Image (cartoon, helix red, strand yellow):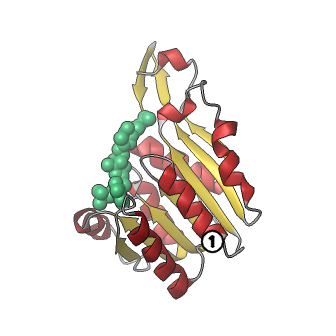
Amino acid sequence: MTLLTDPTPYRHTLIVGGTGMLAGAALQMARRSWRLTMIARTARSLQHFANRLDADHRPPTLVRANYNDVARFAAVVDEIVAAHGVPTLVVAWFHGDGAALRLAQQLAAGGTSCDFYHLLGSASANPATPLDTQRRPFDQWPALRYHQIVLGFIIESGRSRWLTNEEISAGTLYALHHQRSRHIIGTVEPWSARP
Ligand SMILES: NC(=O)c1ccc[n+]([C@@H]2O[C@H](COP(=O)([O-])OP(=O)(O)OC[C@H]3O[C@@H](n4cnc5c(N)ncnc54)[C@H](OP(=O)(O)O)[C@@H]3O)[C@@H](O)[C@H]2O)c1
């Protein structure tokens, strides 16, 4: 994976769903953040992530919460904000958009500035629902800078394939480093060529 050197550490990073395909990026972000909070559903995946940290990493706060339990998840986020303030950087990987929008709204409510990077599955790039249309509800809060990271696919030697976890993590770090408002990892065109 390409390591990017970022001179400015993130103050408080919140990652939701970063223990799977995003773990490589999350490990780098743990190095670059004064404080990192990681939310995932199971103790097992959080522990697996923690086992990959080394002495260079500041110990992250690992929080177990299921984002499909809407009230409980909101309460957990409130606790994180009460303890450490609104995260200055959020990287969010949810299955489905409802939970991402609720989190964005909750964090934006106080008016504190926040960069919100939203990982979107390949289906999000279906031309039937333009990415501009999908981002509109997230763009309504002045304090929240919304960024889309779209998981595409790779076409090589005339064949297409899905991204590897390494490519997803490297692409996510690239989007963060360059503060892209939209970054497509790989390609989503032609749409008919997806694996
Ligand atoms: N377009 C492409 O090229 C491409 C490539 C690779 C993968 N993908 C997509 O990525 C997905 C796999 O991603 P992944 O390896 O990151 O695994 P995942 O099963 O999507 O889990 C990702 C993360 O989300 C957490 N999570 C899942 N459900 C949760 C919930 N209800 N509440 C809180 N946290 C939750 C997981 O924690 P726990 O494990 O603790 O639940 C983990 O941290 C597949 O669906 C695939 O479609 C796409």
Q: Quadrant of the C terminus?
A: top left
- In the picture, measured across the screen, residue 163 lies left or right of residue 6, that is left
| 61 to 158, vertically: above or below | below
Few, some or many C-alpha atoms within 10 Å of disc 1 (few <14, some 14-19, many ≥20)? some
Residue in the image at 60% along x and 76% along y:
86
Q: Does any portion of residue 108 appear in the rendered image? A: yes
Is residue 162 left or right of 125 when viewed as pictured? left
How many numbered marks, from 0 up? 1
State whether residue 70 is above or below residue 165.
Answer: below
Label 1 CB, ligand 1: below 8 Å?
no
Query: Of residues 171 and 65, which is closer to you in this image?
Result: 65
Label 1: state its secondary structure: loop
Q: Nearer the viewer, residue 130 or 26?
A: 130
Tell me the residue that label 1 is attached to: 88
Extreme-top residue of the structure:
158
The residue that appears at 68% across and 38% down in the rendered structure is 133
Q: Residue at x 59, y 61 (%)?
A: 104
Where 11 sits versus 41, above or below?
below
Which amino acid, by three-letter code, is at mark 1? Thr
Q: Residue furthest bottom?
A: 83
- Can residue 178 be seen in this snapshot? no
Q: Residue furthest left?
A: 44
Please provide percent x and percent y for residue 152.
Answer: 51, 32
Q: Residue at x 73, y 61 (%)?
A: 141
Picture coordinates of residue 1, whole percent (x, y)? 46, 48
Image coordinates of residue 25 in percent, x first then y, are 46, 56
Q: Position of residue 48 (x, y in %)?
A: 25, 64
